[in-house]
Amino acid sequence: AHCYCATAHGARSSPLLTTEQAPQPARVLNAFSAKPAEGCSMVTRCSSPLALLMCTLLLHTTLVLGLDNGLALTPPMGWNSWNEFQCNVSESLILRQGKAMVDTGLAELGYIYGRWWVVCGGWRWVGAVLSLESMSLTFRTRISVNIDDCWQAQERDNETGRLVADGARFPNGIQAVADQIHEMGLRIGIYSDVGKKTCQGFPGSHDKYELDAKTFAEWGIDFLKLDTCALTFDERLDPQPDYARMSAALNATGRPIVYSICNWGKKDPWTWAPDIANMWRTTMDIYPQYARVMSIVDDQAGKETFAGPGHWNDPDMVEVGVDSTIFNWYVKVQFLFHVA
């Protein structure tokens, strides 16, 4: 007799609920399909509302602990500023893009960051939907608008040492932008670098991982892309420790933040990144040429075994919308690859 709360990476049980049969940890991944895990019965109901509440609290605790953060259990989806706008990024641009995603209906499409389930007799929580017979309670988590490089000022704050936004591009600061994006029902992502500088020469997060993670959390950031420019030769030989430090720093904030490693597939991150990140780049950058897109598609062969709920291969951004009339004839191929 117990309640079983599961995410993709682990499970917790509580002797509060009665079920005919509880799923085993090895079967947890089956929960991410539309069907119940093999051998799981969901016909008996919770012994009391208090038991359900306790089970829900256990689920919430699981979602924010460690790298097993309950995030990216389906592949993260959203919009990123780099491929189209590069350094021409600004507060007004990000807010326009967020509004456009809502107005066009794109905000309602695609996957959600967190997908989890609870089996408590007749109760089942799947994809943020909790239901019992005719009663239903739904919480919708939407996709992300991500700010890439060039949002930063040229120098950190002299007194606090914190990253600050460029005052001309983001006159109200990142937190104000994040608040407005959240009000639209969207999530917001930001960019930094594991090295001392970003790829465009702005301050990176090297040796300031804890401070930057705290800053991002206080701003309300939901997604972090951490690039890999400006590392020393020795750090390039083994980038894992630095990426792991940021992983620990993000977890220590207590705010669920999807963690995306962008080290261009160097040192086979699919073999070590699943323990510290939600996703990792598998190749060098994409650009709007059909041959480049297809080379990245071909390069993914064999890497699918390293991906799964909470940890994903990242073959770089979809080139949909990039201003290239010729390439857009072929963009459906890349889009179909990403959704396959």
Image (spheres, grey):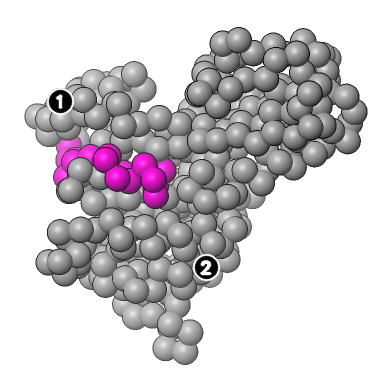
Horizontal arrangement in the rendering, residue 46 relative to residue 115 (left or right): right
Q: Give the quadrant of residue 149.
A: bottom left
Horizontal arrangement in the rendering, residue 128 relative to residue 231 (left or right): right
The image position of residue 69, as x and y in percent, is 54, 45
Q: Identify residue type, mark 1.
A: Asp
Q: Residues within 10 Å of mark 1 (few under 14, many from 20)?
A: few
Is residue 161 visible in the rendered image? The answer is yes
Q: Which of marks 1 and 2 is nearer the N terminus?
A: 2
The image position of residue 53, as x and y in percent, is 82, 37
- Residue behind mark 1: 298
Q: Identify residue type, mark 2.
A: Lys
The image position of residue 200, as x and y in percent, is 23, 65
Looking at the rendered structure, which numbered label has been put on residue 214?
2
Range drawn in magenta: 270-288
Q: Which of 218 and 148 is in front in this view?
A: 218
Q: Which of 64 and 82 is in front in this view?
A: 64
Q: Name the residue rendered at 15%, 66% in the picture.
A: 234
In this view, 34 is above or below 138: above
Check residue 275 for magenta coloring.
Answer: yes
Is residue 112 visible in the rendered image? The answer is no
Could you tell me which secondary element the residue under label 2 belongs to?
A: helix
Q: Name the residue rendered at 45%, 77% in the picture.
A: 162
Could you tell me which secondary element the residue under label 1 belongs to?
A: helix
Q: Name the residue rendered at 69%, 11% in the picture.
A: 41
How far apart are the alpha carbons under marks 1 and 2?
A: 38 Å
